[in-house]
Amino acid sequence: MAEIISTPPPMLNPDVTEEKAVTPWKEAWKNFKKNKLAIVGLAIVVFLFYLPFLQI
């Protein structure tokens, strides 16, 4: 009877590692953080939002 030798399937490219999937929200936040003017605008909007609640 013939002997069956099993070999593992060959890897496509051993140098390439699997990357985690990036959610659209994380990608958008990463791009948002790169834009300094957008960060300043967000800070102004948050300040204007909380301004009525401040009792000066």
Image (tube, rainbow, N blue to C red):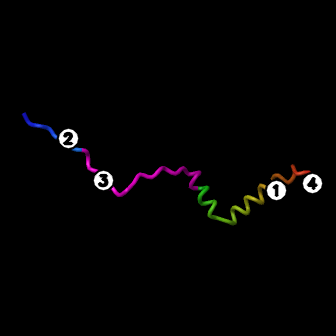
Asked whether, in this view, residue 24 is left or right of residue 11, the answer is right
Instruction: Check disc 2 and give the amino acid type.
Output: Ser
Q: In terms of sequence position, does the residue under pointer 1 or pointer 3 come before the other?
A: 3
**Distance (Cα) linking label 4 and label 3:** 65 Å
Counting residues from the N terminus, which is met first, the one under dot 3 or under dot 2?
2
Instruction: Report the residue marked by disc 1.
Output: 48
Question: The N terminus lies in which quarter of the figure?
Answer: top left
User: What amino acid is found at the position of numbered circle 3 in the picture?
Assistant: Leu
Alpha carbon of mark 1 to alpha carbon of mark 2: how far?
68 Å
Quickly name the residue at label 2: 6
Tell me, for residue 25, which label it has, or none: none
Q: How many marks?
A: 4
Is 32 drawn above or below residue 53 in the view shown? below
Judge depth for marks 4 and 1 and give the one in front.
4
Dot 1 alpha-carbon crowd within 10 angstroms: few under 14, some 14 to 19, many 20 or more: few
Give the amino acid type for the residue marked by disc 1 in the picture.
Leu
> Could you classify mark 2 by the number of other residues whose Cα lies within 10 Å: few (under 14), some (14-19), or many (20 or more)?
few
What range of the chain is rendered magenta? 8-27
What residue does disc 3 label?
12
Q: Which of 39 and 3 is in front in this view?
A: 3
Based on the displayed image, in which of its 4 quarters is residue 15 positioned?
bottom left
